[in-house]
Every structure is written in structure tokens, then in C-alpha cells.
């Protein structure tokens, strides 16, 4: 499998759009009404179609802690990386829209990100997935398009969505947990260096600013050795 140029990879679609948040003028899927609030939502809708930034206060900063590490010999994913992603939130043109400046990692680890104008979705979701897929495609010498389409299908067809509780502000609030294994049983699994069991876990809550509580991609070998752990989590400020 040969890699596509980055520009081609970024043009791929997921849930009818790129790995990117919706703009305010693009009508997102409405939040559940009281009558259907207990219905289980679709995984892709939760991550890409909800106005996640509506509860992010203009003038605030949302911070996520990031970690990536791998036990694969010769370190193809690079040295362990522990850093942060910050989103500075300002008002957009529409009530639920936000203008955002994103700082993805620091120093020499810095990645280009944004700015994002009048967005209703949280840009940390596509940024995390883009960064993950590009690293994975490099390690596997795989076409990022192939990997992205597998994740797209996984969210639409293979994800399990269950209600969960999320600690926030000194109490527990309602949320959703999304779990999927998009490469399980894949026809190219023999070329994935054991990573075909990659498990993606997302936790969201409409109470948490930006709605994204955590995201994780993790894989272990048959002996329990860590092939990859990549995760991002909402940082709750003390007090």
C-alpha cells in the first residue's frame, strides 16, 4: 500500500464531510428532543454532526492532554510524546458558531491547525484523527485513504454506542461512549503489524465544553505488550 500526498488525504470524507467540524451555516443534526432523548445516537453523528461548541463560552480556552507511546521495536511511531492541544474560543457569526485558534502541541512538536471560523463542531476530533491516520499510514506504509475509509465505515456500521457517566465539575454527568474496531477482519490485516485489533474509544458529553471528553486509539499484542496507545483527554481546571 503506497501513501497519498497529505493534501489528498485531507480531502477524504467521513460522515459526509472531511475529518472536520461543521460550519455554523451548515445545518447540523439537531439535538435529541425530549421525546427521543433516550434513543441511542449514531456514532458519526455524535462526533461530527452535533453543534459541540455551543456550550463553549467565548473568551474561554479549552485544553486537552495528549499522549502517544508505542512498544514496537525500533520505535516507528517515534519517541513517546506527551503534550497539549489548546483551543481559544471566540464568538462566531451564528449563535452556536465559534471562531477558534488551535495550538496543537508545542515547540518542535507543533502541528498546523486552523484557524477555524464560525464552526459549530469541535476541531479537536478531526485534528486528532488526521494526526493519527498520517502516523499510522507512515508506520504501515499504507494508503491513508484506505485507513480513513475503514474508520468511516467503522463509525457508521461497526461502532457500539452506550450511555456512560462522566466526572465533571465535582459530579457525574451523562455522556456517551463509542467503541469500534474498524480493522478487525480486514482483508489487509496481515500487513498491519498486529495493529488490526486497534480499538478506538470516544467519550462525549453535552455538559462538557466542546462535548469531547476523551479519544483513544489503542492496540496490544497477544502477550499484552503495548503496540500503540494514543489518547487525548479534556483537562479539568482545578476549582
Image (cartoon, rainbow, N blue to C red):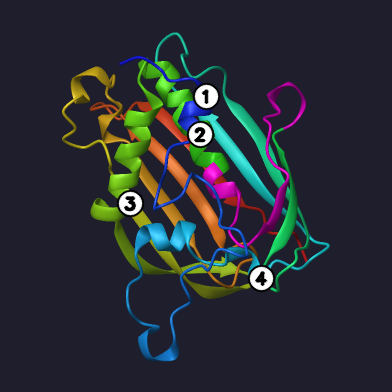
| N-terminal-most mark, 3 or 1 | 1
Q: Residues within 10 Å of mark 1 (few under 14, many from 20)?
A: few
Q: Residue at x 73, y 21 (%)?
A: 108
Magenta highlight on residue 123 = yes
Q: Residues within 10 Å of mark 3 (few under 14, many from 20)?
A: many
Residue extending farthest top: 74
| N-terminal-most mark, 3 or 2 | 2
Residue extending farthest bottom: 35
Marks 4/1: CA–CA distance: 30 Å
Q: Taking 26 as reference, is 156 above or below it? A: above
Read off the residue under disc 1.
6
Quadrant in the rendering for residue 196: top left
The reply to whether discs 3 and 2 touch (Cβ–Cβ < 8 Å) is: no
Label 1 element class: helix
Marks 4/2: CA–CA distance: 25 Å
Marks 4/3: CA–CA distance: 25 Å
Quadrant containing the N terminus is top left
The reply to whether discs 2 and 1 touch (Cβ–Cβ < 8 Å) is: yes
Q: Of the residues tagged 3 and 2, which is closer to the observer?
A: 2
* Residue 170 point in image, percent of width and height: 64, 72
Q: Residues within 10 Å of mark 2 (few under 14, many from 20)?
A: some
Marks 3/2: CA–CA distance: 18 Å
Read off the residue under disc 4.
96
Q: Does residue 45 appear left or right of residue 221 in this picture? A: right
* Res. 228 visible in picture: yes
Which stretch did the figure color magenta? Answer: 106-126
Read off the residue under disc 3.
155
Quadrant containing the C terminus is bottom right
Label 4 element class: loop
Quadrant in the rendering for residue 4: top left
Read off the residue under disc 2.
10
Amino acid at each position: 500500500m503506497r501513501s497519498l500526498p497529505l493534501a489528498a488525504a485531507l480531502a477524504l470524507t467521513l460522515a459526509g464531510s472531511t475529518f472536520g467540524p461543521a460550519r455554523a451555516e451548515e445545518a447540523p443534526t439537531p439535538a435529541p428532543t425530549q421525546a427521543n432523548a433516550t434513543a441511542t445516537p449514531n456514532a458519526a453523528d455524535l462526533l461530527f454532526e452535533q453543534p459541540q461548541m455551543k456550550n463553549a463560552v467565548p473568551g474561554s480556552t479549552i485544553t486537552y492532554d495528549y499522549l502517544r507511546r508505542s512498544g514496537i521495536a525500533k520505535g516507528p511511531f517515534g519517541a513517546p510524546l506527551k503534550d497539549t492541544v489548546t483551543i481559544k474560543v471566540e464568538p462566531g457569526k451564528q449563535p452556536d458558531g465559534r471562531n477558534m485558534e488551535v495550538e496543537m502541541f508545542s515547540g518542535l512538536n507543533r502541528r498546523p491547525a486552523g484557524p477555524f471560523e464560525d464552526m459549530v463542531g469541535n476541531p479537536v476530533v478531526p485534528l486528532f484523527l488526521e494526526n493519527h491516520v498520517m502516523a499510522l499510514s507512515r508506520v504501515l506504509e499504507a494508503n491513508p485513504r484506505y485507513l480513513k475509509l475503514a474508520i468511516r465505515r467503522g463509525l457508521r456500521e461497526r461502532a457500539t454506542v452506550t450511555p456512560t457517566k462522566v466526572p465533571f465539575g465535582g459530579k457525574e454527568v451523562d455522556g456517551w461512549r463509542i467503541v469500534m474496531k474498524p480493522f478487525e477482519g480486514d482483508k489487509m490485516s496481515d500487513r498491519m503489524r498486529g495493529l488490526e485489533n486497534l480499538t478506538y474509544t470516544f467519550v462525549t458529553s453535552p455538559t462538557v465544553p466542546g462535548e469531547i471528553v476523551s479519544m483513544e486509539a489503542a492496540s496490544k499484542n497477544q502477550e499484552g505488550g503495548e503496540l500503540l496507545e494514543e489518547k487525548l483527554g479534556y483537562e479539568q481546571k482545578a476549582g
